[in-house]
Image (cartoon, helix red, strand yellow):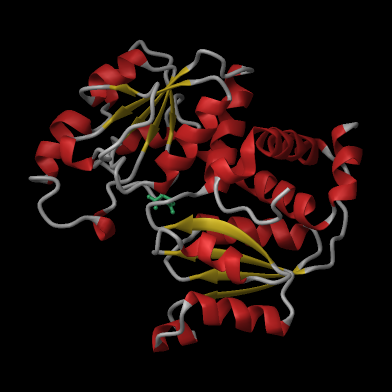
Amino acid sequence: MQRHLVGISQIGAVRCHRLIALARAIRQASALPRLDKSVALAFFEPSTRTRLSFEAAATRLGCRVAAFSSAGSSIEKGETVADTIRTLEAIGFDAIVLRHRASDAAEHAASIAKHATIVNAGDGCHEHPTQALLDALTLLDEFGSLEGKRIAIIGDIRHSRVYRSDAALLGMLGAIVGVCAPPLLMPSHLPDGIVQLPDAASAIEWADAAIVLRLQRERMDSGLVPSLSDYRRRYAVRREYLVGSRVRLLHPGPVNPDIELDAVLVESEHSLIQRQVSNGVFIRMAVMIDIFATELVEHFLSH
Ligand code: ASP
């Protein structure tokens, strides 16, 4: 088994099932182990929930956490991913949670690390595996099984690492994945089995649950969306589409209120967004236990 957590396809179905089951068991557990390891949170891109969630997960398990972001670190002076990984290993960190704007950053870091475990917390437009695991856990809590469930992913598909990880994992769990985006925000290739949906209104009608994505302005070349009002007209999820519907709404955050999603929906009865955030901590605890204390996994799963 590869020790690093780079992407859903690399870790495969068996480990994904095990991490989700482990997160559920940890959520019920009355006592938690103390792992006593050191974890570096190396965030070369901004993040609020992912960074705090990894920090909460690691500290609840008795790990020592050092967090740094690009502002105020040597990354601003041009330090490369490779230098950072070597430095953090030399200091003695046992795991390095990495976020970076380059789409191969996690893979590259994993090829350099000699003993530390690399956990991908989002690399460019490539993958965000713990987000997919927490989305799957949230959907499984809601539906019991995802076999045959229709999950629409709506928004900036092309630039989204969340889409790539979610589509891989939800497909693995038996869901039918649909995507909905303006033509220029669609990737050049969609894997077999993915359904294309023409606009947000039909996506909501089709779906059991919708994962709404942020319009990633920082990754867009200019001109991909003619105007925000054009975008909203066809691709925003609006309150009126949900009248009389039971569709569940997820969003990885941060939400651009009233752009990809009407702000009132964030706290509506359709929304699972807060549950995603809470589940994120349990998924990241599961990741830490799986990395640092494999021998405890069976213990948790048998209780
Ligand atoms: N927080 C998610 C990510 O880091 C989604 C987003 O930024 O739009 O990929």
Residue 117, compared with residue 227, is above or below; it is below
Left or right, 171 with respect to 22, comes to left
Q: Quadrant of residue 20?
A: top right
* Residue 30 position within the rendered picture, expressed as x and y whole percent measured from the top left: 87, 42
Instruction: Name the residue rendered at 29%, 52% in the picture.
Output: 216
* Residue 38 position within the rendered picture, expressed as x and y whole percent measured from the top left: 75, 71
Q: Is any atom of residue 104 visible in this view?
A: yes
Residue 202, compared with residue 289, is above or below; it is above
Residue 42, compared with residue 9, is above or below; it is below
* Residue 157 position within the rendered picture, expressed as x and y whole percent measured from the top left: 31, 40
The total number of labels drawn is 0
Q: Is any atom of residue 242 visible in this view?
A: no
271 vs 40, nearest the viewer: 40
Instruction: Name the residue rendered at 52%, 29% in the picture.
Output: 170
Left or right, 139 with respect to 76, comes to right
94 vs 113, nearest the viewer: 113
* Residue 295 position within the rendered picture, expressed as x and y whole percent measured from the top left: 90, 48
Q: Quadrant of residue 219?
A: bottom left
Left or right, 40 with respect to 106, comes to right
Q: Quadrant of residue 232?
A: top left
Specify the quadrant that holds the C terminus.
Answer: top right
